[in-house]
């Protein structure tokens, strides 16, 4: 296949990916629940020029720590278009860019353009990546392409221009998200694999790893210094309550893991791993293995959310799968039936369509339905218009950002636990308030957090009603599919 033909096909894959993504994203005007934190930050940057590092609403008042580059990128475009529109388009545009580093890396590893194009298409429609970044204003939509561009530049680090690009993208990465630690761990494990296999490590490679490690560690210490002093080494778990950490691995079973990663990348990726360990000892593939092992380690230590870890793992497997595909393709070419090699590629593509592409579309269709309903938004708008501005609203963990964004009121709990000294106790208390049956215990806990109103949707808890509410201590001020109760009693 000619280079110009491959370039045109790659651009077509990019456009197809972007069109599919935006089609699903605009199936609903709303976003995933956690996205409203980012949307609020974007609008604040648009108004003031700065992120909302000091927030009077989240947890009743707290400080945020995060690298802000991703939010600034979205805020820049929101100067031209509506922030909600930009939040639908730009993250999907960024996520669609993943096909380029995957294609370039696969082309360098396999030297086969048709296989590299297949790898690019596979990466775009891995179910866990496609569905979880469709309607989510997440920095990972920028982080993931950045990391895989850096991997490609490091594969070609023997050329000065690619080394410089790797360092530039590394700086962009550390300004975007704390998951730059993934890069450090991947590079260190790459060096370890090279030593274990008795392969020579060039001085330049060692210098790159050391520089990347010190830069990322230093920058993240500067950003998260306050959190390090407050939480100590446990800061790497972001102060997340134990119950949530325990559930990191239990929202999917093994069959579902196979479904969201894709059988084709998994099988061919494992085949490639076997080959590189016992036969080829290919240097560039060892770099990919380093990042694959880094993902396993981060998942095992529960340092990344399960689905985020699966996204990284699946994309590494796609790259490994292109190498495995090339091995099988080359072998068939050497047999007495070389024409079957092309049939093998066609069959592989059809299998991917059946086992990954269609599931990706199905998962995306379901994902865009997990958004705030019109009834929820109406109830939150009622709170905004009918309660004092300093009111504290009790909601579930998932509803915390909605309370801040739509109602513009203080919440008791949301998903950002860093720098919250009593995060574990708050999480337990909020869960208790949605299932406890004794009024005295409930009122005492509500008073503890100065709660003025209870927002009850029954969407994120098993209970269909609050058992402790009565006319003596609670007034139902909003009665629809969503219930809102005003807290009247106080225990001194």
Image (spheres, rainbow, N blue to C red):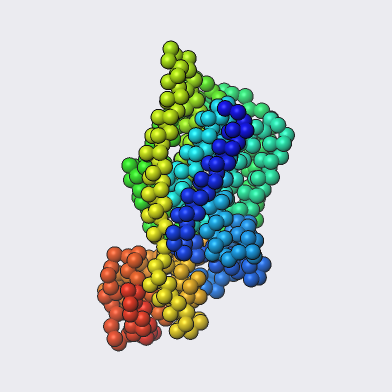
What residue is shown at x 28% (from left), y 73% (from top)? Answer: 465
Apparent side of residue 235 relative to residue 465 in the rendered image (left or right): right
* Residue farthest to the right, as pictured: 160
Whether residue 400 is visible here, answered yes or no, is yes
For residue 248, above or below residue 355: below
**Quadrant of residue 398 in the image?**
bottom left
* Residue farthest to the top, as pictured: 336
Apparent side of residue 367 relative to residue 8 in the rendered image (left or right): left
In the rendered image, residue 176, in percent from the top left (x then y), is placed at 61, 53
Q: Quadrant of the C terminus?
A: bottom left
What residue is shown at x 63% (from left), y 60% (from top)? Answer: 77
In the rendered image, residue 213, in percent from the top left (x then y), is placed at 63, 43
Apparent side of residue 218 relative to residue 23 in the rendered image (left or right): right
For residue 174, above or below residue 267: below
For residue 487, above or below residue 403: below
What residue is shown at x 55% (from left), y 25% (from top)? Answer: 282
- Of residue 57 and residue 149, the one placed in the foreground of this image is 149
- Of residue 262 and residue 125, the one placed in the foreground of this image is 125
Q: Quadrant of the N terminus?
A: top right
**Quadrant of residue 232 in the image?**
bottom right
In the rendered image, residue 414, in percent from the top left (x then y), is placed at 46, 66
In the rendered image, residue 385, in percent from the top left (x then y), is placed at 47, 82
- Of residue 211 and residue 379, the one placed in the foreground of this image is 379
Whether residue 285 is visible here, answered yes or no, is no
What residue is shown at x 50% (from left), y 75% (from top)? Answer: 408
């Amino acid at each position: 296949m000619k280079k110009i033909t491959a370039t045109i096909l790659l651009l077509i894959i990019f456009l197809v990916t972007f069109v599919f993504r935006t089609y699903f994203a605009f199936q609903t005007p709303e976003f995933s629940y956690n996205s409203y934190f980012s949307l609020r930050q974007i609008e604040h940057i648009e108004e003031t020029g700065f992120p909302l590092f000091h927030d009077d609403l989240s947890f009743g008042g707290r400080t945020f720590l995060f690298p802000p580059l991703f939010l600034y990128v979205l805020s820049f475009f929101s100067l031209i278009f509506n922030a909600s529109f930009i939040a639908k388009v730009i993250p999907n545009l960024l996520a669609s860019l993943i096909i380029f580093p995957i294609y370039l890396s696969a082309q360098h590893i396999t030297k086969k353009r048709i296989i590299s194009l297949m790898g690019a298409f596979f990466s775009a429609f891995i179910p866990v990546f496609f569905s979880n970044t469709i309607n989510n204003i997440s920095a990972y939509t920028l982080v993931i392409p950045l990391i895989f561009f850096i991997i490609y530049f490091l594969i070609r680090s023997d050329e000065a221009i690619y080394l410089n690009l790797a360092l530039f993208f590394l700086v962009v990465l550390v300004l975007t998200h704390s998951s730059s630690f993934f890069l450090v761990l991947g590079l260190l494990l790459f060096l370890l694999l090279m030593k274990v296999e008795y392969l020579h490590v060039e001085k330049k490679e060692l210098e790159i790893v050391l520089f990347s490690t010190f830069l990322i560690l230093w920058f993240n210490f500067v950003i998260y210094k306050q959190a390090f002093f407050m939480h100590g080494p446990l800061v790497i778990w972001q102060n997340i309550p134990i119950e949530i950490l325990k559930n990191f691995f239990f929202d999917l079973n093994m069959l579902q893991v196979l479904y969201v990663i894709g059988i084709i990348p998994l099988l061919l990726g494992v085949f490639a791993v076997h080959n590189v360990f016992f036969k080829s000892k290919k240097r560039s593939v060892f770099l990919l293995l380093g990042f694959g092992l880094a993902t396993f380690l981060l998942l095992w230590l529960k340092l990344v959310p399960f689905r985020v870890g699966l996204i990284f793992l699946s994309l590494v497997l796609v790259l490994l799968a292109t190498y495995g595909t090339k091995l099988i393709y080359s072998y068939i070419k050497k047999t007495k039936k070389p024409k079957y090699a092309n049939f093998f590629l066609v069959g592989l593509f059809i299998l991917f369509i059946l086992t990954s592409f269609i599931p990706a579309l199905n998962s995306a269709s379901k994902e865009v339905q997990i958004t705030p309903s019109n009834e929820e938004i109406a109830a939150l708008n009622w709170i905004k218009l009918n309660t004092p501005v300093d009111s504290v609203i009790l909601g579930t963990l998932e509803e915390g950002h909605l309370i801040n964004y739509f109602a513009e009121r203080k919440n008791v709990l949301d998903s950002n636990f860093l720098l919250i000294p009593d995060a574990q106790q708050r999480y337990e208390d909020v869960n208790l308030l949605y299932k406890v049956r004794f009024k005295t215990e409930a009122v005492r806990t509500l008073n503890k957090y100065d709660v003025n109103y209870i927002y009850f949707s029954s969407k994120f808890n098993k209970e269909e009603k609050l058992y402790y509410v009565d006319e003596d201590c609670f007034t139902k001020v909003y009665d629809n599919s969503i219930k809102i109760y005003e807290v009247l009693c106080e225990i001194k």
